[in-house]
Amino acid sequence: MSILKIEDLHTYFYSKSKQAFIRSVDGVSLQIAAGETLGIVGESGSGKSITALSIMGLIGAEPGVIAGKIGFKTNGIQKNLLQDINEYVKLSKQDHRIMAVKKKAKEWHRHTDRVMKKIRGKEIAMIFQDPKASMNPFITIGRQISEAVRLNTPIKNRREAKEKALYWLEQVKIDSARLRFNNYPYGLSGGMCQRAMIAMALASEPALLIADEPTTGLDATIQSKIVDLMAELKSVLGITMMLISHDIDVIKRLCDRVAVMYGGTVLEYGSARDILSADVETKFEDQINREFLHPYTSALLASVPSEDHVKGNKPLQAIEGDVLDTINIPRGCRFYRRCNRVNAAIEDKCQTVEPQLFQTGNQHQIRCWLYAA
């Protein structure tokens, strides 16, 4: 059963200097089953975080979310988080591309706040990249977690909420939880503050947890401990999670399924085992096996440092060219200009027609003309 199902999501921003749309999320479709962890990987600017913020209804700049469907199911009730968006947005299209947008922004934000009021923080919780910037610096972490408990669970008594907050601080393995309860965010280390943020997200007992780069900015030792903590919470609590990360090893360890994003859309989607298998390095040397990965996914995995790079002085493989400018998205394949696997049979299509997500195996999809047959 899918808890979250995103269909053809578009989130755009407008660049006044260039008089054009920044197509940050441009036709994303994903789904997450109950108890599953979906990992989203890709270079900076690929649309990962904007997808997460679109789900949470936290896009402030205009025009923001302009089209799509975000289906969310909890307690047997199906909701569309973008319900009635067509009443607030009018799109002008040419050759299936959005050329102009007219949006009733204020009315849409009021509508979104009504829809998300009982969902944001309660049924869907989010862990942000910078925990210290995401927590109130003038309120102790214990009080912030207690307030989350009282707002989003049946517990309303202050003393009971405090005990529940202490329980979650202990669950995330904060040393001396009762002492830390009265600390302010600025009085905690980065790792401790991230644990407190995880505790606050889990205290609401959400159906879905979104973690956006939860290990960014932490040193290697603390990163490892946070990943260990999340792996344990996943095993013990069976939480449903969307995990956004640049770290392929983190995705490999925690995720059941993976979506590879580039230029605002999904280029590959399937099980973590299929996409990030342990023998992946042989796939770069064996042309036959390489055919089972999108060229962009292959390039991403080849750029991950390994023991061979350190001990054998093996050079890292870089992806040629620059990340796609989502203002000037080409009509063909978004990765075409950086791809090293284009051949004469598909070159014309690669330049002029964007491929769909082709099914290449059991629930494995790849957006590439190499797989059209």
Image: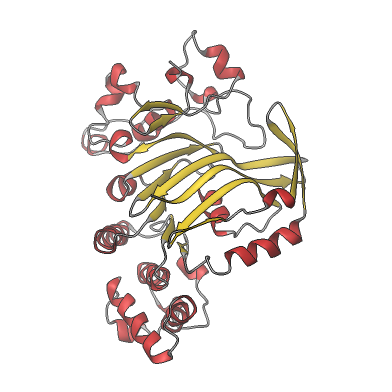
For the C terminus, the quadrant is top left
Residue at 38 percent of width and 48 percent of height: 38
Residue at 53 percent of width and 24 percent of height: 355
Q: Can residue 245 be seen in this view?
A: no
Q: Compared to 79, does 165 lie above or below?
A: below
Q: Which quarter of the picture shows residue 212?
A: bottom left
Residue at 42 percent of width and 72 percent of height: 204
Total marks in image: 0
- Residue 102 place in picture, x, y as percent: 78, 47
Q: Nearer the viewer, residue 113 or 170?
A: 113
Q: Nearer the viewer, residue 80 or 199?
A: 80
Position of 133 with respect to 19 (left or right) is left
Q: Can residue 164 be seen in this view?
A: yes
Q: Compared to 121, does 149 lie above or below?
A: below
Q: Which quarter of the picture shows residue 79?
A: bottom right
Q: Compared to 133, does 92 lie above or below?
A: above
Q: Which quarter of the picture shows residue 237?
A: bottom left
Position of 99 with respect to 340 (left or right) is right
Q: Compared to 188, does 359 lie above or below?
A: above
Position of 329 with respect to 166 (left or right) is right
- Residue 80 place in picture, x, y as percent: 57, 54
